[in-house]
Image (tube, grey):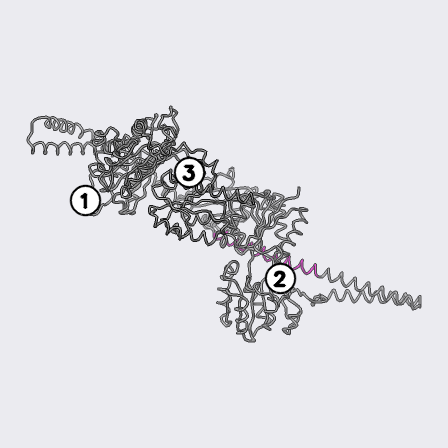
Amino acid sequence: MPPRVLMLHADSELHPWTEAIEAGFKAGLESKLGPFISQHYPVGRLESSDPEAGLLLLSLLKKQPEPDLVVILGDEPLDWATGMGRSWLAQKPLVIGDSLNFSALFLSGSQKITGAKLDPDLRQVFSKALALFPNTKEVLVINDSLGKGARLKPYFTQLVANLEKIDFVFVEKGGPEVIEEEVKKLGPNSLIFVGFSTLLAQTSDPQGLLNRSNLPVIGLFAHQVGRGMLGGLVFDGEALGRILGGQAAALLKAKPFSEYQAVWTSPKKYLYSAPDLTRFGLDRSDLPEGAQLINQDAQPVEPGAPLWSIVAIGGLLMVLFYLAYYYLKKTKTERNLKQVNLWLENQVSRSTDELEQIYRRIHAELLERKGAEEALFLSEQRFKAFVDHTPVGICVTDVEGGIEYANQAFCELFGIKLESIFGKSAKEVLPAGIIGQPRSSEDHLEVPVKLPGRGNLVLLTKGARFEVPGGEPQEITFVLDITFQKRIENKLRSANEEAKQAVKAKAEFLATMSHEIRTPLNSVLGMSKLILGTELNEEQEELTQAVVQSGENLLQILNGILDYSKIEAGKMPIHLGRVDPVELIESVIEMMEVQAKAKGLELVCQIEPGKITAIYSDEIRLSQVLLNLLGNAIKFTDRGYIQVEVKASEESFLLFKVKDTGIGIDEKDQSKLFEAFTQAEQNNQGRPSGTGLGLAISARLIKLLGGRIWLESQKGQGTSLFFILPAKPFERPIKDYERPGTLGPRRVLLVGDFAPRNLVLSELLEFWGLPTQVVHSKFWNPEILKGPLDLILVDHNLTEPEPGELLALIRQTASCPVMSIAPASQARKDRLGLALPLKRANLYQGLQMALSVQQSPKKAVVQAGQYPQLAQSLPLAILVVDDNPLNRKLTQKMLARMGYLAKVAQSGIEAVALAQSGGLQLILMDIQMPTMDGLAATNLIWETVKASDRPKIVALTANASPEDLLIYRSRGFDGCLSKPLMPEELIECISLWARFFNQQDQTSEEA
């Protein structure tokens, strides 16, 4: 089957430039590979100006058969290919042309990429133009400010600097009127240069516009010559296409890069319009050598034919003349004379053509050979300069060890001259082991030598055998003096050994000292606690308590020092076993609750429901790390809260996070916090207690457990400590509270002002099948209780009114269970109290118990399961718009229980885009949103969506009085629902508009 080629180009395929490239490409590819199937897409500036069109193109390409090769013509398609289309084009063979950006940098990696770069030689272009028009004083440059034009602009920087006596005027914006106005300003000694410009294309007669200037016009592209342009050094589109076609054939044949040139420069030629030359008083002799003319009837013979060809033609004519004369003399007939004359003319003409072709071919070969010789000479000189100036010694020997070449560094290293050792055996003039040792190409040998005047050296040598085609095998040896590096290496090795010994001695000393201090300290603590058990007066008890507290602080410091010394000595034991991260974190938080409560701090545990299972780790060490991190967070946080999170990552790791709202850490102190005996400086806070070992021990324990730790912090904005551990799963039975949907479907109202706990509870209750509506105390409204509820949770952390008052008020009017969330001392006094910190098992049991309480029948107005088929009987396409993720999710869940799969948007901008795309019948629109609120979004929908496709829009707002409803209707809304959203009101709204659209459908069918 013929190969399939996809062509992405900036201009229309009917554009003369694109046509020329594609014609050349077709000829170049078919000449080497045969027929092929092509597909064309004009890309233009899709990604920069029209990203939706760029995505549409990407979607369209993915639906087409996979191409065997992709051709990219132009910088705009190349920008799209390296941006939006990058992933789709990965690993596909690419041929890139008509681009200023393409270079060898694109050839890195395994993807097969080749192509030709547009390289405008503006210096040469203007050099030849000014040679034709030496009196030029001003140049008008017509060149876009965007696209290729912007990329061409830097090429003018050096040019303008070199041509100081010429004024350059740039036209980069506007249309034909701007160009014509600038042309009128030009004097007689002026030139016009056309670069990458779409400005001329905006006029119906670009050729006439340029001709009316009566000024010479030069440019860059062959297709523009003769169309108002005199000519110059221009890019040859067809020749470029042939190069790209040849490169495409090489890629499709899967040839290695070494067998063809990877990056070409687009071919250029001198091309001029014959009528325009005449118009400006020029002829062919004024043009550069090899220049071509278009728009002429006959191509004259190239001037300057070699003398030998003229002599040959003359000699041939003489021979032919004498043959004819001899023949005429014998026949003496007029008829034969005419035939001979005709034959003579034909022979002369044929011989002249053949001689001219021979001359052209020989001349081209001579030029090509001369160019190749010059390039080879330059390459040899460049390589020789590189070899002579490299610091690595290089020596080339024959198979018998005779020295054939040595560079300057090699001779200086051994104190010799090349002329004195050339042809001699390496073994005679060089130390043993440098050259001729058996080795593989991968071996590097360190050879100790002693050289006169330089002493003992260590040389690093590497040798390889190679063979030049048609020549004898040779060996090349590289030599580098590494004496200094070896001395440094030996010193570092000695210093490292001394440091290890010092660390070991320090660890042993710390361990011994901590053990020695622990014995009397235990006695002090024990006796002090016994004294507290006796009858003491107030002062004695206070002093004894101070002794006990100080002793326990000292014991904690000693434990830290002992742990650190064990880790440093490599004696810290790790016992792996089953660890439940959820239970472990909850127990650690429970232990730290007293310290947090003493400072008025809240502790929150956020764990992804149902995703964290038991792992294989060391429970004691993991608990120690969490205690250290929580203790640090409490120590440096005066108000707010501390949150512990754990998430399962895709790379089989658990990510732990301890976040506080404390004083934060300066960036300059962060890098040293995990070092031993180091603490961050806390201005105006006093020196914190402790040794500064907590984070150092935690970091080393986490490393022993196979993880790593890091932190993120800003001064005054709190600190987040992260660490990851391998999540090797440990099989165990799944508990009830780890299963989704086990308590639902029920509806829960959560009244609380502490946002972090609200979020944690909402996620957990949703996981158990309890869709939750969250209400802040300042927005409390008794009307909320009129909705269908199965359970109410009231948090103790309320700002207004008092938690106790609100709890009592709700219990008086609610007909469903009402549970309180409070510290353990308060929760124990409440039959339906949940104690802080909340543990999942305890919370699950408490909810299970509360939901078993009988509900009053009068409150079961709308049950979630009563309307599962509502969407089937009254179908409706619904969009929910709300910037609050909890409210958005709640509304979506309520609709899902009625059978509606609603779309969601989190901003007015998204809502407008979805409405414009069509297919919607009802939008539930929040009013207060950032960037674009509900009012602005509704106005824009009315302006951009035609009436027959416009959905009904219902406002979601806390302001839903009759007066507000009239205001919203005047702003384009079709209805209004108040927050918090009640299920029965939502069902009534859905039913109203579903029936409306159902009747519309029936009416249209009858019509």
Q: Can residue 599 be seen by looking at this rendering? A: yes
Q: Is residue 46 left or right of residue 560?
A: right
- Amino acid under disc 2: Ala
By secondary structure, the bulk of the magenta-drawn segment is best described as helix
Q: How far across and down, in percent of the image, does residue 761 sit?
A: 32, 35
Query: Which of the two marks, 3 or 1, is nearer to us in this view?
Result: 3
Query: Closest to the observer: 850 or 199?
Result: 850
Does the magenta run of residues contain 376? yes
Which quadrant would the C terminus be assigned to in this image? top right
Q: Which residue is mark 1?
A: 686
Span shown in magenta: 360-389
Which numbered disc, 3 or 1, marks the residue that appears first in the sequence? 1
Per the image, label 3 sits on a secondary structure element best described as: helix
- Amino acid under disc 3: Leu
Q: Is residue 850 above or below residue 115?
A: above
Q: How far across and down, in percent of the image, does residue 141 sit?
A: 53, 67
**What is the residue that sits farthest to the bottom in this orientation?**
188
Q: Distance between the Cα atoms at labels 2 and 3?
A: 65 Å
Q: Is residue 907 left or right of residue 346?
A: left
Which quadrant would the N terminus be assigned to in this image? top right
Checking the image for residue 895, the label placed there is 3
Q: Distance between the Cα atoms at labels 2 and 1?
A: 79 Å
Q: How far across and down, in percent of the image, does residue 715 sit?
A: 27, 47
Mark 1 surroundings: few (<14), some (14-19) or many (≥20) residues within 10 A: few
Does the magenta run of residues contain 423? no
Query: Closest to the observer: 442 or 360?
Result: 360
Per the image, label 2 sits on a secondary structure element best described as: helix
Q: Quadrant of residue 330?
A: bottom right
Q: Which residue is mark 2?
A: 222
Q: Distance between the Cα atoms at labels 3 and 1?
A: 56 Å
Q: Is residue 662 left or right of residue 479?
A: left
Per the image, label 1 sits on a secondary structure element best described as: loop
